[in-house]
Image: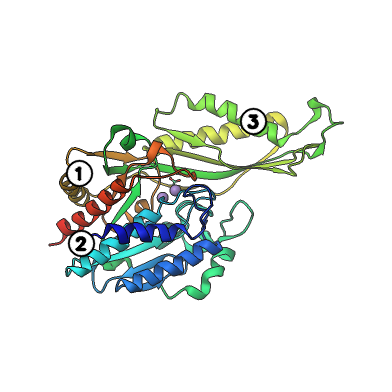
């Protein structure tokens, strides 16, 4: 059965790869040294659990049971400043359930840690390629904010690649994750059974103006790329107001100014534009407004405008039978302390829904904080979650 000490110890051991030194935070972006070392460690733990370890060309790490099995897992890369549980929890929970069920003779469980879920190069890149949503050739051309290509980054772990994995061997996928929002923490509940995952769009936008002297260039003559971003943001917030719901979100999370100096009018601004909603048609209407607003700002201010590739995932619903098994397990393990809920964060489960039935369960995030070093979850909630995961797998076995 679940061994809480072994489970929590392994979660803490994974945290040591890229530990930030600030609280329990981690710095483990995809294909960095800490991420690659963590993937090698995970492959060892999978082998020790009696699974066959396999690393594919994207760096996704699989621990394969013999014959057909359910697949459990998540991702072990982090945001540039990330928490210790985002992704890691689902991977170590999967490992613990695989070990616990193997000890009692089944059902068989395979384990996965997908690569670049956090989108250093795109949106859930490792599972997007594995699921066929994204072509490897197109993925290889994607760049991070420093201009490195995915092809260059994944070459860093090329010597670890042992081969691809056929999705047909898996009967379904369940991903355990922290909620990354305030709902369960605020209600005092322990488990969220996910109903659906929002859709997302993400693209880089570039304004090219004229780099010039910050002391001598009159304001009226400037073609200032930062001022364009600022005007774009203000206009966009106003224009989106009639289209969005209270659940719709949009973010400019990364801005790069060139040459980024106090005494130079910036000639170039490259920034990320991301938006999320549960409805594909609303995502499309938002895209139209974003493009139109950027075009108007560029034209009014005499700047060149270019858009990067539009990346995205559609909203998806969870599989009814997997969801029902999770709900039954949650009612057993945490009676009166669980609920159904949507996911506003993205997950590898979205990509896998192209290949097999998928479902997800959440445990609370203290104060709803994630994608930050402060991210944490009470140990009793982590343990309740892994117990629900194991029980659901048992309920699903014929
Ligand atoms: C995944 O981490 C997301 O950005 O939702
Ligand atoms: Mn995650
Ligand atoms: Mn994340």
Determine the residue positioned at 39% across, 72% down. Answer: 44
Q: Which residue is mark 1?
A: 334
| Helix, strand or loop for disc 3 | helix
In the image shown, does 312 or 175 lie closer to the viewer? 175
Q: Is residue 48 above or below residue 196?
A: below
Report x, y in % for residue 337: 22, 39
* Residue 273 at x, y percent in the picture: 54, 40
Left or right: 223 in relation to 130? right
Label 2 with label 1: CB-CB less than 8 Å: no
Of badges 1 and 3, the one in the foreground is 1
- Callout 1 environment at 10 Å: few (<14), some (14 to 19), or many (20+)? some
**Residue closest to the far front:** 5
Give x and y (percent) for residue 69. 24, 66
Tell me which residue sits at (48%, 63%) in the image.
Answer: 136
Neighbours of disc 3 within 10 Å: few (<14), some (14-19), many (20+): few
Mark 3 highlights which residue?
A: 230
Could you give the CA–CA distance between mark 2 and mark 1, rounded to whole angstroms? 17 Å
Residue 42 appears left or right of 260: left
Say whether residue 135 is left or right of residue 155.
left
Across and down, in percent, residue 129 comes to 44, 61
| Quarter of the figure with the C terminus | bottom left
The vertical placement of 390 against 193, above or below, is below
Q: Is residue 11 above or below residue 166?
A: above
Q: Which residue is mark 2?
A: 1
**Residues at discs 3 and 2 in contact (Cβ within 8 Å):** no
Q: Secondary structure at mark 1?
A: loop
Of 121 and 79, the residue lying toward us: 79
Q: CA distance from mark 1 to mark 3?
A: 48 Å
Proximity of marks 1 and 3: CB atoms separated by less than 8 Å: no
- Looking at marks 1 and 3 on the same chain, the residue that comes earlier in the sequence is marked by 3
The one of 169 and 114 positioned closer to us in this rendering: 114
Q: Is residue 126 placed above or below 194 in the rendered structure?
A: below
């Amino acid at each position: 059965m679940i061994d809480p000490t072994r489970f929590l110890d392994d979660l803490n051991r994974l945290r040591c790869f890229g530990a930030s030194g600030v609280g329990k935070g981690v710095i483990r972006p995809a294909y960095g040294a800490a991420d690659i070392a963590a993937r090698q460690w995970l492959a060892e733990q999978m082998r020790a659990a009696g699974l066959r370890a396999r690393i594919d060309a994207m760096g996704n790490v699989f621990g394969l049971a013999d014959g057909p099995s359910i697949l459990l897992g998540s991702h072990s890369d982090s945001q540039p400043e990330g928490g210790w549980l985002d992704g890691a929890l689902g991977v170590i929970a999967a490992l613990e359930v695989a070990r616990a069920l193997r000890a009692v003779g089944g059902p068989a469980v395979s384990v996965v840690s997908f690569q670049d879920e956090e989108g250093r190069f795109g949106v859930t890149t490792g599972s997007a390629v594995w699921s066929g949503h994204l072509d490897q050739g197109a993925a290889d051309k994607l760049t991070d904010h420093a201009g490195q290509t995915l092809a260059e980054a994944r070459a860093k772990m090329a010597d670890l690649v042992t081969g691809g994995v056929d999705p047909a061997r898996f009967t379904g996928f369940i991903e355990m994750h922290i909620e990354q929002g305030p709902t369960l923490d605020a209600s005092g509940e322990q488990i969220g059974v996910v109903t659906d995952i929002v859709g997302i769009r993400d693209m880089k936008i570039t304004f090219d103006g004229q780099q010039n002297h910050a002391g001598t260039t009159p304001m009226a003559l400037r073609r200032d790329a930062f001022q364009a971003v600022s005007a774009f943001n203000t206009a966009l917030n106003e224009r989106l107001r009639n289209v969005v719901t209270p659940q719709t979100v949009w973010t400019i999370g990364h801005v790069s100014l060139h040459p980024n100096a106090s005494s130079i009018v910036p000639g170039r601004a490259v920034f990320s534009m991301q938006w999320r909603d549960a409805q594909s048609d609303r995502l499309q209407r938002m895209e139209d407004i974003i493009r139109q607003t950027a075009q108007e700002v560029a034209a009014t201010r005499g700047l060149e405008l270019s858009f990067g590739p539009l990346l995205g995932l559609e909203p998806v619903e969870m599989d009814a039978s997997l969801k029902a098994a999770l709900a039954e397990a949650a009612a057993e393990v945490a009676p009166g302390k669980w609920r159904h809920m949507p996911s506003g964060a993205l997950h590898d489960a979205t990509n896998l829904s192209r290949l097999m039935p998928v479902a997800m369960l959440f445990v609370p995030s203290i104060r709803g904080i994630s994608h930050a070093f402060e991210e944490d979850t009470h140990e009793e909630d982590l343990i309740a979650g892994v117990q629900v995961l194991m029980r659901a797998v048992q309920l699903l076995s014929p």
